[in-house]
Image: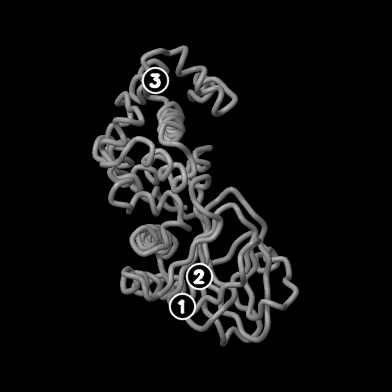
Amino acid sequence: MSGVLFRSSITVRDPLSDVLEVLGAHVVRRTRMEAGGTWAFAFPAVDRLKFVAVLRGEQWMLTPNEPPCLMKTGDVCLLGRTSYVVASDPELEPQDGGSLYPDGGADEVKVDSGDGVVAIGGSIAFAEVNGDFLLDTLPGFLLVRSETSASEAIAAILDLMSNEILRDAIGTGVVAARLADILVVEALRALSADGDRSRIGWLGAISDPRLGRALRAIHRDVASPWTVAALANVAGMSRAAFSAIFARQVGRPPLAYLRYWRLTLARSLLLRGTNSVDDVARQVGYTSQSAFGNAYRQAFRTSPRSHKPGA
């Protein structure tokens, strides 16, 4: 298992670093697959972020409610809470993808002769129960084409990952996991910078010049008594326009997003066990412990104290 993708300062935040660090995101599986002939494998939806990258050749990616997507050399996709099929032909009936891992996991998999497609896939888990925040804010399927601004970095990482897995040397597991961590961050960066903002939700909002300012303000000073008017002023927009565009892009109204992030951050702090409930409430912007407790129970269906270690 790798470490977290980020260990950023508690006071200096950009939204992506903030979310990945607080959620304790880390790659827990990465597998290199070589596949020849005709093949199709189905995988169920799980509460993890997943990635698939094509090193050589082409393969199809099929997800519910989306047209089949042909992935080519250098392409990377991220998958949220969705089932999916990878295939040499989108018309094939898929087998259970679990059959590729009879022993529960493998660093290398070969299908048929293995002389066609080479791909790497993996799963990103989250510390404790905090993954909902990111999974709730991202679409089920996100594609990073090889022509993006991050293409050189992604290609270099993929080459290093592939070679590292094939080496099977001392420390290979650690190095491959760290490279997978970096790959995911580069893919998220590329989506934020180059993706269609109308389709990438929260990632698009981060890179939007106006919404991005408001999001950075929230993550930089989460305890501030933010109002919609104050955030709209940071964004340089009217209150009505800011509220409408923020909700459409992020999937939540501004103060609902602020509240969800405050409570997600609070849960992370409580799980660390170093601060009292009162201290955590103040750190995330609640001046009343009862108001904090009510909001926490409404969001997580349990009390703040239940998430203290040993509770």
The residue where tag 2 is placed is 120
Q: How many discs appear? A: 3
Residue at 49%, 46% in the rendered image: 137
Q: Position of residue 272 (x, y in %)?
A: 42, 30
Residue at 59%, 75% in the rendered image: 60
Q: Nearer the viewer, residue 14 or 311?
A: 14
Q: Is residue 205 above or below residue 309?
A: below
Q: Earlier in the sequence, mark 3 or mark 2?
A: 2
Q: Is residue 90 left or right of residue 291?
A: right
Amino acid type, label 1: Leu
Q: Secondary structure at mark 2?
A: strand
Q: Look at the numbered discs 2 and 1 and tell me whether their residues touch, using CB distance below 8 Å.
A: yes
The residue where tag 1 is placed is 55
Mark 3 and mark 2: Cα distance apart in space? 42 Å
Q: Secondary structure at mark 1?
A: strand
The residue where tag 3 is placed is 281
Q: Is residue 303 above or below residue 128?
A: above
Q: Earlier in the sequence, mark 3 or mark 1?
A: 1
Q: Is residue 19 left or right of residue 232?
A: right
Amino acid type, label 3: Ala
Neighbor class of circle 1 (other Cα within 10 Å; few <14, some 14-19, many 20+) is: many
Residue at 39%, 39% in the rendered image: 22
Q: Position of residue 255 (x, y in %)?
A: 42, 31
Quarter occupied by residue 172: bottom left
